[in-house]
Image: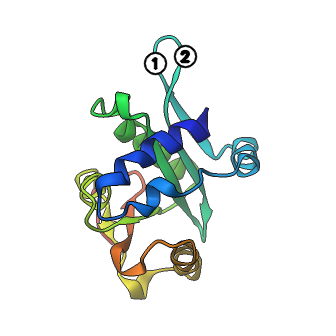
Amino acid sequence: MLRQIEAAAAQRFRNSAHPEVARMSPTELAALEDLASGEGILVATDSRDSLLGFALYAPMAGDLYLGELNVLPEAAGRRIGARLIEAVVEVAVQRGCRWLLLTTFRQVPWNAPYYRRLGFEEVPEDERSAALTAEMARQAARGLPPESRVAMRRHAGAGTQSS
């Protein structure tokens, strides 16, 4: 079901500046299983326990990296994504991380502008860890244009506090 949610959420990109995202394969099942066994997935459900969205996260150089955030299109606009992010921030706090990190599209309205409203800021290039730089290079190799991407961070436990 997580792969179906990811594929459905990616369809928002069909009419964006990055339609290639809608054609990308969802996360491999084996990778999802690895994350689930390592507590790297948080899910959002409705009152009947039907899945509405999920967040994938993993440790990254002493911080926590939000690798995916997906919500079913029909559940959009109900702050499900924002609540998932808050839950991942709480995981970061519990693990003693300073930052919750992510990479996203700079100009897509439901990407960087959305994350800014939730307290994220751009990570200056000279402050990126080797792991974050490598993640951005991996995404470029997958076909995501590096000039359109941005690395962002949110201080764990302190909302919009900057470095």
Question: Dot 2: few (<14), some (14–19), or many (≥20) neighbours within 10 Å?
Answer: few
Q: Is residue 139 visible?
A: yes
Q: Nearer the viewer, residue 1 or 24?
A: 24
- Determine the secondary structure under disc 2: loop
Report if the CB atoms under discs 1 and 2 are less than 8 Å apart.
yes
Please name the residue shown 59% across and 76% down the image.
Answer: 131
Write down the residue under mark 2.
49
Please name the residue shown 30% across and 66% down the image.
Answer: 121
Horizontal side, residue 110 vs residue 36: left or right: left
Question: Dot 1: few (<14), some (14–19), or many (≥20) neighbours within 10 Å?
Answer: few
Residue 158, image x and y in percent? 34, 53
Residue type beneath disc 2: Asp
Q: Looking at the image, which residue sits at the far top?
A: 48
Horizontal side, residue 145 vs residue 1: left or right: left
Residue 81, image x and y in percent? 38, 40
Residue type beneath disc 1: Asp
- Determine the secondary structure under disc 1: loop
The Cα–Cα distance between marks 1 and 2, rounded to whole angstroms, is 5 Å
Horizontal side, residue 50 vs residue 116: left or right: right
Where the N terminus falls, by quadrant? Answer: top right
Where the C terminus falls, by quadrant? Answer: bottom left
Residue 148, image x and y in percent? 34, 74
Q: Residue 124's image quarter?
A: bottom left
* Res. 46 mark: 1
Q: Is residue 158 visible?
A: no
Please name the residue shown 56% across and 37% down the image.
Answer: 4
User: In the image, is residue 150 above or below residue 99?
Assistant: below
Q: Nearer the viewer, residue 11 or 45?
A: 11
Residue 74, image x and y in percent? 36, 28
